[in-house]
Image (tube, rainbow, N blue to C red):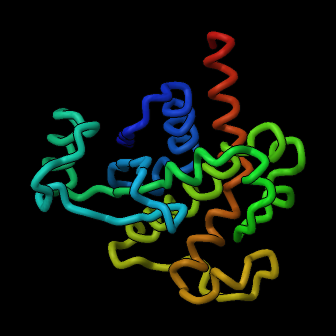
Amino acid sequence: MITTHNISDKPLQLAMDYAIKKIYSGTILMPIYIDFSNKLIHSHGLHGRVNINDYNRIPSSINEESRGVIRDKYDGWFHYITLSNKFYNINKKRILKMGSYWEYNLIYGETNTKYYSRLCWLTTVLTHELSHACQFDINDIGVTKYSTICLDKNISKNWCKDIYEFDAEKQASVVRVEFLNFMKESIKGQVHGR
């Protein structure tokens, strides 16, 4: 599985790669490019399946080797996930107070929410966008796994407007805590030299 990013925080980059491979290996088939963007200010994250041949200027963090693999092995297709730098960089207190679709304490517990608030936000948004990648890679038409729309009381009504959004949120909710734990494990391993 190929993942590339435009972030300079190496421990975070390695932690994301580690968690993505642990959770989504065999489920997401195409390469993934994760872009932390300053331009995304009204949304937390976006997913698109795009073709590298449609670009006039390919993102520089997709190196030549990855470009060749994307063109040769995947007919140019890859997943482009954009995450908001604005929301990632919001300070911890504001993340905990801001009205959002997610109840961080209920999902991750008080300790994780208090000490890993940015990772909680990142995990929440990234697992949702990666779930959209799964929808496309299952059979190329955006199939939904969870078609019982709005029957889950743990899913906010905000997600019930669209079957694909509900499906992605439901699928993400199944793996979020495990994804966060893999990210924390990777970061701790890097700190302790494992």
Which quadrant of the figure contains the C terminus? Answer: top right
Name the residue at 18% across, 47% down.
58
Pick the front one: 29 or 154: 154
Vertical comparison of 10 with 66: above or below: above
Q: Looking at the rendering, which quadrant does residue 48 occupy? A: bottom left
Q: Is residue 107 left or right of residue 67?
A: right
Residue 181, position as x, y percentages in the image: 72, 40
Vertical comparison of 60 with 137: above or below: above
Pick the front one: 21 or 41: 41
Vertical comparison of 185 with 176: above or below: above
Q: Looking at the rendering, which quadrant does residue 4 occupy? A: top left
Residue 188, position as x, y percentages in the image: 69, 22
Pick the front one: 148 or 117: 117
Which quadrant of the figure contains the N terminus? Answer: top left
Pick the front one: 183 or 85: 85
Name the residue at 51% across, 41% down.
21
Vertical comparison of 49 with 176: above or below: below
Residue 186, position as x, y percentages in the image: 63, 28
Name the residue at 20% across, 61% down.
51
